[in-house]
Structure formats: C-alpha cells, structure tokens
Image (cartoon, rainbow, N blue to C red):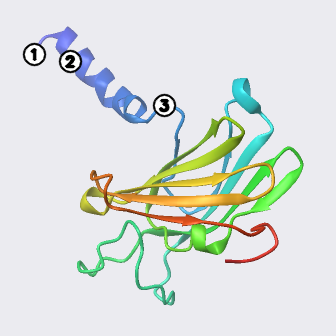
Amino acid sequence: MNRIHFLFLVLMFFLAPVLAQLPGYTTIENPGTYLLRLDAKQNARVKCEIRILKYSRDDKQKGWWGVDVTSGVPARSVVAGITFWVGKAKIQAPMSSYADLANLDYAKLVQRGQTYSLQIMGGDGITGYNVNIDFNNTVVTSRAVHWGSDSADWEETTYHVDTSTTDY
C-alpha cells in the first residue's frame, strides 16, 4: 500500500464519525442533560432541554419505543424529561410525550412557520423510530411517532389542554 492510500485510510478513520453525523442534529450518546437551540440565524430564543437517564431494572415500563422487548435486552437509556423555552416562557412537555422513548440517538429543533418541533431519532435497526414533538409559544400541541422505514406505522397524540401546568 502506498503512502497516499495509507494517509487516505487514516484520515477517513478519524473523519468518518464526523461525516456520519446528521446536519443540525445533536448526538445523544450517554445519560445526561442535553441543551438544544434553534439555529441562531432562524430564532435564537427557542431552546430545549432533554434529560436522559440510564435504564433502571426497577422501572416498571413494559413498552418502549426503540427496544425489542422479545430480545430480553433492556434499554440503554430512557427520557426523564423535556422542557422547552420560547423567549422567557418555560413549557414543560407532558410526560406522555416522552415517557415511552428509549435509546435516543439524535435530536434537533426546527421551526415550521409559527410553531416549532423537536425531532428525535432513536432505536437500533428494526427498533428504529422518529418522533416529532410540536409546540408553540405556550404549549406542546402534539406528538407523532413513526416506526421503522414504513411511514404508515405511526401513532399521534394531540394535546387540547394547557400542557404547561398539567402532567399528562
């Protein structure tokens, strides 16, 4: 192998993880707190905090998005909470919008007109899923989960109450 090929392989080894990341997404690798901000060019006053915990066998949750329950392999991590800020307004995501999400891989905030969306990708292989949690200046308005590569497999929840003061 000549030097050029060797140099190319070494560079690709170190650059591959960087190139593999999805544009605009935050990689979620370990338990902890992740702070996401909407692109400063679009709207710097919108942000989101996602709290991730290591899975505990004491957790009685039976069905998780992102986990193959038939395999016997537990979740790596689970979502413990999501909070949004639009300006100074703090919006607590309802528990039902995140409590069944496990093994998150990527997340990002996007703006759609006057509303915003937290886009999450999680799971591995056949357990892969995508979630959109939509919110506006005061409340979380909906959550949609798409499973696998078939967009026909999905569930959607629409919130018709003020989710900032009630835990649903």
Q: CA distance from mark 2 to mark 1?
A: 7 Å
Whichever of labels 3 and 1 marks the residue nearer the N terminus, that label is 1
Vertical placement of residue 136 versus 110, above or below: below
Report the side of 85 relative to 152 (left or right): right
Quarter placement of the C terminus: bottom right
Residue 23, disc: 3
Q: Horizontal and vertical percent for residue 103?
A: 43, 63
Residues packed near mark 3 inside 10 Å, few (<14), some (14 to 19) or many (20 plus): few
Vertical placement of residue 106 versus 61, above or below: above
Whether tag 2 and tag 1 are in contact, CB under 8 A, the answer is: yes
Q: Which residue is situated farthest in the right direction here?
A: 88
- Residue at 20 percent across and 18 percent down: it is 6
Q: CA distance from mark 3 to mark 2?
A: 28 Å
Q: CA distance from mark 3 to mark 1?
A: 34 Å
Q: Horizontal and vertical percent for residue 140?
A: 69, 59
Q: Could you tell me which secondary element the residue under label 1 belongs to?
A: loop
- Identity of the amino acid at label 3? Pro
Image quarter of residue 5? top left
- Identity of the amino acid at label 2? Phe
Q: Could you tell me which secondary element the residue under label 2 belongs to?
A: helix
Report the side of 45 relative to 97 (left or right): right
- Identity of the amino acid at label 1? Met
- Residue at 26 percent across and 57 percent down: it is 125
Whether tag 3 and tag 2 are in contact, CB under 8 A, the answer is: no
Q: Which residue is situated farthest in the left direction here?
A: 1
- Would you name the residue on which mark 2 appears? 6
- Would you name the residue on which mark 1 appears? 1
Whichever of labels 2 and 1 marks the residue nearer the N terminus, that label is 1
Q: Horizontal and vertical percent for residue 50?
A: 64, 58
Q: Could you tell me which secondary element the residue under label 3 belongs to?
A: loop
Q: Nearer the viewer, residue 133 or 157?
A: 157
Vertical placement of residue 63 versus 127, above or below: below
